[in-house]
Amino acid sequence: QVQLVESGGGLVQAGGSLRLSCTASRTIFSINAMGWYRQAPGKQRELVALITRDSTTTYADSVKGRFTISRDNAKNTVYLQMNSLKPEDTAVYYCNARVVTTYLAHYWGQGTQVTVSS
C-alpha cells in the first residue's frame, strides 16, 4: 500500500508557474514509477509526466518544454514544476504511483485543482 499526499495547486494567470508536490508514505525507491495525471471537466484522465525509479522521464506532448517532473528520494517526494501555464492546463492533477510485484498496482492521491485564468 502507498498513500500519496499532494499539494501546491491553485489559481494562476496564464504564463505563470506552479509547483506540485506529492509525498509518498514509503520510500520511493520501492516504487517503480511515479507520475502526474490530470483530468479536466468532461475529459478523460491523461498522463502528464512520469518518472521511473532510475529517473527516466516521459512527458505528454502538450507539456513538453513547459513542465518538469523530478524526485527527491530523501523526502519521498515527487514534484511537477509547471511553467508557462495555459488555460488549457486547467484540471485536477493527480499523483500516481506504480508498484510492480506479481502484478502492476496503481495508487492515487486525492487530487489538487490547478486553474489557469486567461
Image (cartoon, helix red, strand yellow):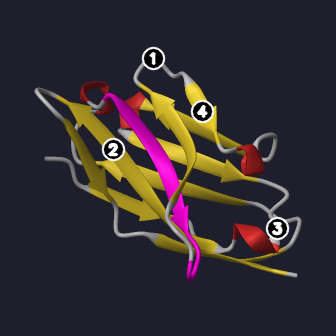
Instruction: State left or right for residue 115 relative to residue 72.
Output: right
Residue at the (38%, 50%) spot, across then down: 96
Would you name the residue on which mark 2 appears?
A: 97
Is 66 inside the magenta-drawn segment?
no
Instruction: State left or right for residue 59 relative to residue 2.
Output: right
Q: Answer above or below: position of 55 versus 105.
A: above
Q: How far apart are marks 1 and 2 (CA)?
A: 14 Å
Q: Circle 3 — which element?
A: loop
Dot 2 and dot 3 residues touching (CB under 8 Å): no
Q: How far apart are marks 3 and 1 (CA)?
A: 30 Å
- Return the mark for residue 58: 4
Point out the tag, 3 or 4, that comes first from the N-terminus: 4
Which corner quadrant of the image does residue 38 belong to?
Answer: bottom right
Residue 69 in the image, given as x and y percentages of width and height: 60, 40
Instruction: State left or right for residue 104 relative to residue 96.
Output: left
Q: Which residue lies furthest to the top in this view?
A: 54
Query: What's the amino acid at mark 3?
Result: Lys
Q: What stretch is highlighted in magenta?
A: 32-42
Point out the tag, 1 or 2, that comes first from the N-terminus: 1
- Return the mark for residue 86: 3
Residue 90 in the image, given as x and y percentages of width and height: 68, 74
Query: What's the amino acid at mark 4?
Result: Thr
Query: What's the amino acid at mark 2?
Result: Ala
Dot 4 and dot 1 residues touching (CB under 8 Å): no
Q: Nearer the viewer, residue 57 or 4?
A: 57
Dot 3 and dot 4 residues touching (CB under 8 Å): no
Point out the tag, 3 or 1, that comes first from the N-terminus: 1
Labels 4, 1: front one: 4
Q: How many labels does the image show?
A: 4
Q: How far apart are marks 4 and 2 (CA)?
A: 14 Å
Q: Circle 1 — which element?
A: loop
